[in-house]
Amino acid sequence: MKTVILGAACLTLCTALFITSANAATATRGSFGALADGTRIEAVTLTNGAGMSARIMTLGATLQSLTVADRNGRREDVTLGYDKPQDYLTRPNYFGVSVGRFANRIAKGKFALDGKTYALVTNDGPNSLHGGAKGFDKRVWKIESISNGSDAKVIMSYVSADGEEGFPGELKVTVTYALNEKNELRLDYRATTSKPTVVNLTNHAYFNLSGNAARDVMGNLVTLHAERFTPVDATLIPTGERRPVAGTPFDFRKATAVGTRIRDARDQQIRYGRGYDHNFIVDGAPGNLRTAAVVEEPVSGRVMEVRVTAPGIQFYTGNFMDGTFFGKNQRSYRQGDAICLEPGTFPDAPNRADFPTARLNPGQTYVNSMVFAFRTK
């Protein structure tokens, strides 16, 4: 078997797993309510000895909450989302979901593979976004296993039928969430296919390190280990250029507050994205786990480091949230209330031979791994 790394994305406790030692990280399985049609949704909560916890629900294999301590030891949720599963369907914003079959955009909802053109569902103007109208985020995944130990794990799976949302091949997908005692949450996406297809899987968590979205993210200090980014056209499709960040509002090679240049209307790319909604080319060799981004929230002291195997990372500042979305604790989510850092291959890669490949063949295994590591400063 050949492995291809392409960039390789109100809980009632009901079942507690056997704890192997007093310091072991634990996984607890429970109910997370139901959808409007009666479909039951489950969630697994991973907790380490320091009290950091991650709750993952079966709808969309979604990171529904992530509780992390600040410099004073106060633990708060640092991700955006909803309190009820149905809201993830009726008020979609991809909060914390696993995105597929192809995360990000595909131009005009079309791509060619081995001489055949495939037409996808277009759900973002003329383009296909995040897998179409009913991508992996709107599917109920299966819990394959949960385990305790030096890290707590849950493995979830989904089988995407041949032709689903227009994509060829039956795709078998798993995601493993693992939380260790170093306050590191690791995600590993894997997929195999029955026919040649295109794949780009990632997690779409919206991070607000202030805790419970107490403040916006404009004062967050962001470092991106990227010398270049991929500019886009007016519909947010890459032009094909790999532009140096030096001398532009996209230069985050040194820690820079998000709000410093986000409204610089002199830059056409800022105007197109309504802020930051761009793919950055991560320094170093794809396939190796390496640091792509660091985010520091000065008031709480929380620091998040993002390590990736992917060739790129999409930096998005919640530009399309307009205050009409009411999330956890009925908090209104507005533009600039969160940061997304989505590791994957480049947008529109199926249509660009000069971009890192999104192709997956039978007999190959797609892998995309990412680590969200937390500390305080």
Image (spheres, rainbow, N blue to C red):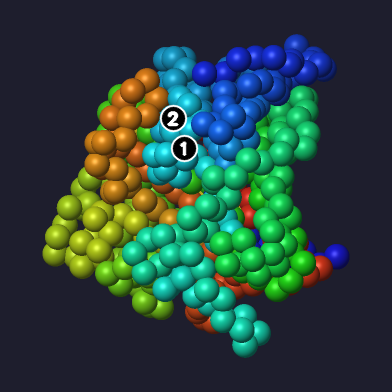
Furthest toward the right, the residue is 1
Decide which of tag 2 and tag 1 comes sooner along the chain. Answer: 2
Residue at which label 2 appears? 82
Residue 136 rendering spot, x and y as whole percentages: 58, 50
Task: Say what amino acid the circle numbered 2 marks.
Answer: Tyr
Residue occupying the point 46% across, 71% down = 109
Residue 323 in which image quadrant: top left
Task: Say what amino acid the circle numbered 1 marks.
Answer: Tyr
Neighbours of disc 2 within 10 Å: few (<14), some (14-19), many (20+): many
Residue 166 in which image quadrant: bottom right
Residue at which label 1 appears? 88
Furthest toward the bottom, the residue is 115
Residue 374 rendering spot, x and y as whole percentages: 51, 32
Asked which secondary structure carries label 1, the reply is helix
Q: Quadrant of the C terminus?
A: top left
Neighbours of disc 1 within 10 Å: few (<14), some (14-19), many (20+): many
Residue 92 rendering spot, x and y as whole percentages: 42, 43
Q: Say above or below: 232 vs 342.
A: below
Residue occupying the point 46% across, 25% down = 83
75 and 324: which is toward the camera: 324
Q: Quadrant of the N terminus?
A: bottom right
135 and 275: which is toward the camera: 135
83 and 297: which is toward the camera: 83
Furthest toward the left, the residue is 266
* Residue 346 falls left or right of residue 275: right
* Residue 258 falls left or right of residue 98: left
Residue 99 rendering spot, x and y as whole percentages: 54, 51
Residue occupying the point 23% across, 45% down = 259
Q: Is residue 7 visible?
A: no
Callout 2 touching callout 1 (CB < 8 Å): yes
